Amino acid sequence: MGMFHTLLTAAIVTTALLGCSRQNAEAPVNAPETEAQPKRPNVVLILADDLGYSDLGSYGGEIRTPNLDALAASGMQMTNFHVGPTCSPTRAMLLSGTDNHLAGLGTMNGMESPEQKGQPGYETFLNHNIVTFVRLLRDAGYHTYMAGKWQQGYTPDLYPPKRGFEESFWLLQGGASHFADAAGIVSGGPKASYHEDMTPVQQLPEDFYSSDYYTDKLIEYIDKNHGDGQPFFLYAAYTAPHWPLHAPEAASAKYDGVYDAGYDDIHEQRVARMRELKLLRPDVPPAPNHPAWPGWDELSEEQKAAEARRMEIYAAMVGLLDENIGRLLAHLDDIGELDNTLVMFFSDNGAEGNNPLDLEKNSEWIPATFDNSLGNLGASGSYTSVGPGWAHVSSIPFSLHKSFPSQGGLVVPAIASFPGRIPEGQRSGAFASVLDVAPTLLSLAGVEHPGTSYQGRDVHALKGQSMLPFLTGETKAVHGEDFVMGWELFNRRAVRKGNWKILWTNAPWGKDAWALYDLVTDPGEQNDLSAQHPEKLAEMMGLWDQYAEEHGVIVLDELKMGYSNSTSHYD
């Protein structure tokens, strides 16, 4: 790690790439770069799966993440970056640059209600009313590579090669065993379905581990065409640390005993570190653990042992993710490409605190199928998740977690680094979101989005804003103070304007009514100001109505929340 950090810092000091961000309009598509046409920048987009806001060392966590911490130090560390409440809606927004309801993922894959089924925006796949920014980059002469999780559609016309990826190794479903057994994650469901491009993969290598293998594939793709003069876009869609929690024993052994003190104690330690790092002001209390969950001292000794072991495995998964990101970036450095590469990293949603046993018939299937004895947790043939107590730790200072449009579900760690373009050692709390990624990458590549028409079909325009002026220090913010963004998933909903936010969450997580929060003084969303500011509440509710109408949001009378509405983890 030390050598990589040194190389990365040296590149930042010595490299200036201000002239490399525009494509020569006269050059034919796929033409090699020439002296008259400077080489356009590469892009590496890294997505973690269910990583919490405070898990990285640079965000206050005790998990060892030296490569991501160095990446944060080399560029911009964002502390107010928003995504969707769950994975597939976030990925739809990322790839399309528009709201997930317009892009087809108005809810999770396969979780639409009878009222939503067949309605525009609730197809639960990335529809053809959008054009992916990946397709536009490929049209403009970029190599486009992917490895990891797709979860954007289950028919061949929706597979990555049909959405712009030149080469890809990908997982069709939303999750799977991280080992070679390729076990599925839902009762009655198939084994994990991996593909290379359009071809199903019949057998994984015996030594397969997801984060390792995805990285191997990405390096393979880069090397295959390296030297041909074309820039590349690389999408590293890792599946760690999504359940089931799996890690080689040597990796989890590094955390033996670290979590024996329990989630309440680790919570206090992280809060203290976040205050030292000035990620949490002294006058701002973190959100407390939700009363639906027991405190550590309320657990039995057997429960404590299992909970501590789960977090050891989770930490190992995050550590291995970090190691592989370091390996990928070091390889780019070795082949002389890192200096000309924008690297972006973030998580697809907040920490996961829900219980996968509540999916379909998992409560019967998992105990009957897997060996979840304490000594086998984390190994191939086991199946467990981290639980809400640890998710609360991962979400500091925010409330709740994945599947909620509270800050704990929406705000994730996010980093951008580009030697010579993004000044090192920057940190910003300016609002930005996953909707801003596509405009940023297209702007960097000098590629214009076609607006509302692409190759003779209607498509949705971009909803976000390029972050380039913000990342390079030309501006202090991505959006103006009056920028509005809305979210809805499983009938839970939110709208944000400036520092004000309204949130509707069902009981026991909320009050089955709108609540109003000032996120500057109350990022943990604990102090409902709706009674004190009725005019602001009315204004924000009007913005919600406008958002819902413009994006075709269907709010149901009966809530359809799947596994995200249970309190069963500690049963």
Image: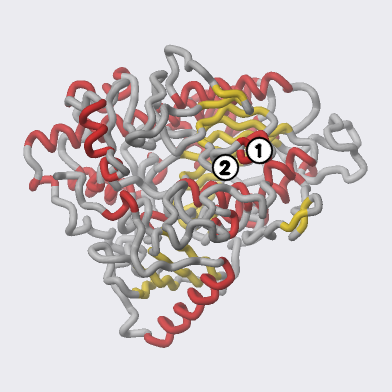
Q: Which mark is residue 121?
A: none
* As drawn, 253 above or below 303: above
What's the residue at 27%, 45% (across, down)? 358
Is there CB contact under 8 Å for labels 2 and 1?
A: yes
Residue 366: x and y in percent read 25, 32
Q: Is residue 374 visible?
A: yes
Cα distance in 3D space between marks 2 and 1: 8 Å
Tell me the element at label 2.
strand
The type of colouring in the image is secondary structure
Residue hosting label 2: 344
Amino acid carrying mark 1 in the image: Val
Question: Where the C terminus falls, by quadrant?
Answer: top left
What's the residue at 18%, 56% (across, down)? 292
Which comes sooner in the sequence, label 2 or label 1?
1
Toward the viewer: 256 or 196?
196
What's the residue at 54%, 70% (across, down)? 484
Residue 243: x and y in percent read 34, 36
What's the residue at 77%, 22% (across, down)? 227
Give left or right: position of 48 versus 260: right
Q: Is residue 396 visible?
A: no
Residue lying furthest top: 206
Residue 30: x and y in percent read 83, 33
User: Which quadrant of the figure has residue 488?
Assistant: bottom left
Q: Is the residue marked by circle 2 packed among few (<14), some (14-19), or many (20+) residues within 10 Å?
A: many
Residue hosting label 1: 43
Q: Is the residue marked by circle 1 packed among few (<14), some (14-19), or many (20+) residues within 10 Å?
A: many
Amino acid carrying mark 2 in the image: Met
Give left or right: position of 433 versus 340: left
Residue lying furthest bottom: 535
Residue 296: x and y in percent read 13, 45
* As drawn, 194 above or below 491: above
Tell me the element at label 1.
strand
